[in-house]
């Protein structure tokens, strides 16, 4: 990625240096130090090593929620940041059409293979499940065993999409469960992932 102008200049003129290099399978991260301790550079201006180029959706007012796009489509979302911005959100689009359920996972935190990438907010989700309510029957199925950062070779990165037959013509409720995994904030802090999101259609 392209470095922010101020940091690039500091590394070139000697007023800044990499004190430690952290190597991962895909990236090399530079932990930098400035000669003038009073000088500050916004770390979030360094650049992005990956982008899924998805825009921030309208109507998101919380750290988790559901935006209903139409009677047959909704976007489930979750952010891993304390101060949300577009690069912090992960989205899960569910569309019901012509007897099929289409599920798409996308967003920057699900698009990086390593939580050590900086700057990054990474999401690691395991055993991602959808439940569709048809009358009194609950129909649960796994949409992905592993999604996002830190996954083995059997995992997936965003954008990820699957489609399958609907268990009934018109489900009244759709639930998304994210119970196993972790949020990584700036690669150094992390919380266990435990989210239930509900699209009440009727």
Image: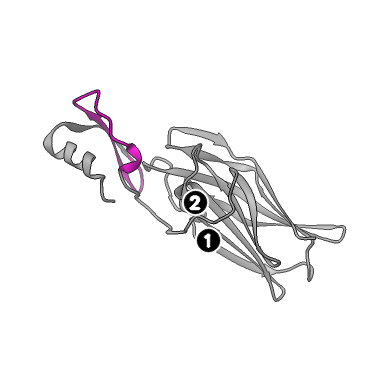
Q: Position of residue 112 (x, y in %)?
A: 43, 50
Numbered mark located on residue 160 in the image: 1
Q: Is residue 13 magenta?
A: no
- Quadrant position of residue 20: top left
Colour scheme shown: one colour
Which residue is labeled 2 in the image? 110
Question: What crowding class fits label 2: few (fewer than 14 Cα within 10 Å), some (14-19), or many (20 or more)?
Answer: many
The residue nearer to you, when weighing 155 against 112, is 112
Side (left or right) of 136 relative to 164: right
Q: Position of residue 124 (x, y in %)?
A: 53, 45
Question: What crowding class fits label 1: few (fewer than 14 Cα within 10 Å), some (14-19), or many (20 or more)?
Answer: some
Instruction: Tell me whether circle 1 and circle 2 mark residues in contact (CB < 8 Å).
Output: yes
Question: What residue is rendered at 43% in x and 58% in y?
Answer: 52
Give the secondary structure at mark 1.
strand
Residue lying at the far left in this picture: please name it: 13
Q: Position of residue 125 (x, y in %)?
A: 57, 47
Magenta residues span: 23-45
Question: What residue is rendered at 36% in x and 46% in y?
Answer: 25
Marks 1/2: CA–CA distance: 9 Å
The tally of labels here is 2
- Quadrant position of residue 201: bottom right
Sequence-first disc among 1 and 2? 2
Side (left or right) of 26 relative to 84: left
Give the secondary structure at mark 2.
helix
- Quadrant position of residue 138: bottom right
Question: What residue is rendered at 35% in x and 41% in y?
Answer: 44
């Amino acid at each position: 990625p392209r470095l922010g102008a101020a940091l690039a200049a500091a590394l070139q003129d000697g007023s800044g240096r990499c004190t430690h290099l952290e190597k991962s399978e895909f990236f090399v991260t530079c932990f930098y130090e400035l000669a003038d301790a009073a000088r500050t550079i916004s770390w979030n201006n360094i650049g992005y090593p990956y982008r899924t180029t998805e825009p921030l959706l309208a109507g998101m007012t919380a750290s988790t929620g559901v935006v209903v796009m139409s009677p047959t489509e909704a976007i489930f979302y979750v952010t891993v940041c304390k101060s949300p911005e577009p690069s912090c959100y992960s989205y899960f689009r569910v569309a019901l059409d012509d007897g099929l359920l289409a599920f798409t996972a996308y967003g920057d935190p699900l698009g990086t293979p390593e939580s050590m990438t900086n700057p990054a907010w990474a999401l690691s989700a395991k055993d991602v499940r959808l439940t569709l309510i048809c009358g009194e029957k609950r129909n649960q199925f796994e949409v992905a065993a592993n999604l996002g950062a830190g996954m083995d070779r059997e995992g997936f990165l965003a954008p990820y999409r699957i489609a399958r037959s609907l268990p009934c013509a018109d489900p009244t409720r759709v639930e998304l469960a994210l119970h196993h995994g972790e949020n990584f904030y700036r690669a150094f802090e992390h919380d266990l992932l435990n989210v239930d999101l509900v699209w009440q259609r009727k």
